[in-house]
Image (spheres, rainbow, N blue to C red):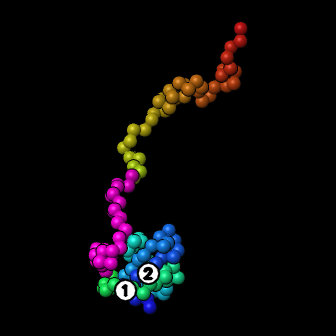
Amino acid sequence: MIEVGRICVKIAGRDANKKCIIVDILKGQYVMIDGETRRRKCNLAHLEPLDDKINIKKGASHDEVKTALKKISLETRETKPKKKTVRPRKLRRSKLAKKETPAEKKAKKVVKGTTKGATNAEKAPEKK
């Protein structure tokens, strides 16, 4: 009963209650499906085969499945390919990057209000 070109109804998953065609038979209990559903590998337990069969070759492309389904007045799922994006990469710190001198580090600390060797008495505000 399970053969290439068999029309089935998907009974599980987000594509449930949609018609599909078996495009290829894979290892074990898996088949490749296409049609109103997404083109993907599917477990046979999630399919209910119908009596209808379409003549397509094993491993048929999406376009071939689409033309075969138009003959029996079924629509196929159209997907758009994702846009290619450049993956952001972290830049390594260059060995030639400018290093802060000890004077510059000290200047930053003074701006913040304290120095490295300051005591609590020096940090406390003066009382009048």
Compared to 108, does 13 lie above or below?
below
Disc 1 element:
strand
- Residue 89, image x and y in percent? 39, 52
In the drawing, what numbered circle is on residue 8?
2
The answer to whether 99 is drawn above or below residue 36 in the figure is: above
Q: Point out the tag, 2 or 1, that comes first from the N-terminus.
A: 2
| Relative image position of residue 26 (x, y in whole percent) | 42, 85
What's under tag 2, amino acid-wise?
Cys
- As measured in the structure, the alpha-carbon distance from the residue carrying label 2 to the one carrying label 1 is 9 Å
Q: Residue at x 39, y 52 (%)?
A: 88
Q: Please tell me how crowded label 2 is: few (under 14), some (14-19), or many (20+) other residues with Cα within 10 Å.
A: many
Segment colored magenta: 60-88
In reply to whether residue 77 is colored magenta, the answer given is yes
Residue 33's spot in the image, x, y percent? Answer: 40, 78
Q: Is residue 87 magenta?
A: yes
Within 10 Å of disc 1 (Cα), the crowding (few <14, some 14-19, many 20+) is some
Three-letter code for the amino acid on which mark 1 is drawn: Lys
State the residue in front, 73 or 60.
Answer: 73
Q: Is residue 65 visible?
A: no
Q: Residue at x 33, y 58 (%)?
A: 84
Q: Quadrant of residue 122?
A: top right
